[in-house]
Amino acid sequence: METNDKYSKIVTDETLRETIYHGNEEYPFQYYEEDIWQFDFHCVDWHWHSEVEFVFVEKGTAQFLVGGKEYVLTSGMGIFINTKVIHRFEASESVIIPNIVFLPDLLSSKESIIYRKYILPILNSNIDCLVLAPSVNWQNNILNLLLSVFSAQKIKKSREIKTVELLLKLWTVLYENVEVTEDCSVSEISARTTAQLQIMMQYIHKNYVKHISLDDIAKTVSISKSSALNIFNKYLNTSPINYLVNYRLKRAAKLLTNTDNSICLIAQDTGFENVGYFCRKFKDLFQLTPSEYRKKGNLPYSNV
């Protein structure tokens, strides 16, 4: 079992793909028992992975931003997140979220009829995620099976085979109750849009110290400024420029923690031309001035 007793970080590459491997090649499954409040800035920041994910809210209330939508989940609820879907979890207090992350081919070989008939249709569907509520009978069945999967991690002798047995039961309930729409055109559009978002974000990450305009960001993927705005708003609930500013501020927070550079120099080094503006925006994001943040010393900074 993986537990977090310190501030945690989501480590990603420049496309926001999570770089950690969940489990191993022989057994691509991992159970985590986490508290969103212990992550940098009290959020599990934007990332995606090839594995599917099931999350259970054991305690508290959290905001789950998945794909282009936001969901508020309370204690006793859960969520399924499909493969390669970008997501972020936020909390304003301690929120305990035991969760599992695994590659779908753990359940069956990709060459098998089971994979082709029952697993692939969900992976290729238009389902980014599915909120699981205990008030819905079949969803409650999934939640109970999920809790059984968690409990199975305490078994030593037959943990792996018991886990796969429960996951197959869970997946069967999911398959039998969701309306799977295999629309290739929708899938292709979603994949293209996600790729465009990742390329624009990568451009921001590489060039944040320079002067960047909305037009510059949009040109990286040859789309209009309004299209760039729509993509960022849909998937990240913010504008490209707001994302740029917040990225600069998080880089500045890291420099405040790790260097003795002056606040003025840090502002310049992270793309801010006006120190006063930098200080105002910094306080808006962190509820502390740069000086106060530096004095705290032990605050987490984003791994960006």
Image: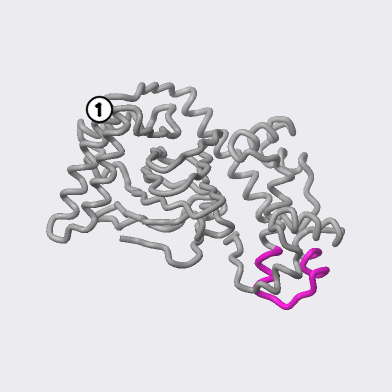
The location of residue 15, given as percent across then percent down, is 55, 49
In the image, what residue occupies the spot 24% across and 55% down?
153
Tell whether 250 sits left or right of 186. right
Q: Is residue 294 left or right of residue 92?
A: right
What is the x, y in percent for residue 246?
A: 69, 52
In the visual, does 103 lie left or right of 111? right
Instruction: Name the foreground residue: 46 vs 79.
Output: 79
Q: Quadrant of the N terminus?
A: bottom left
Crowding at dot 1, Cα within 10 Å, few <14 / some 14-19 / many 20+, comes out as: few
Left or right side of 64 for 31: left
Give the quadrant of residue 75: top left
Residue of label 1: 117
Dividing the picture into quarters, in which one does residue 114 lie? Answer: top left
Q: Quadrant of the C terminus?
A: bottom right
**Bounds of the magenta span?**
252-268
Q: What residue do we see at 28% from left, 43% from top? A: 146
Q: Position of residue 188 (x, y in %)?
A: 49, 28
The picture quadrant where one finds residue 301 is: bottom right
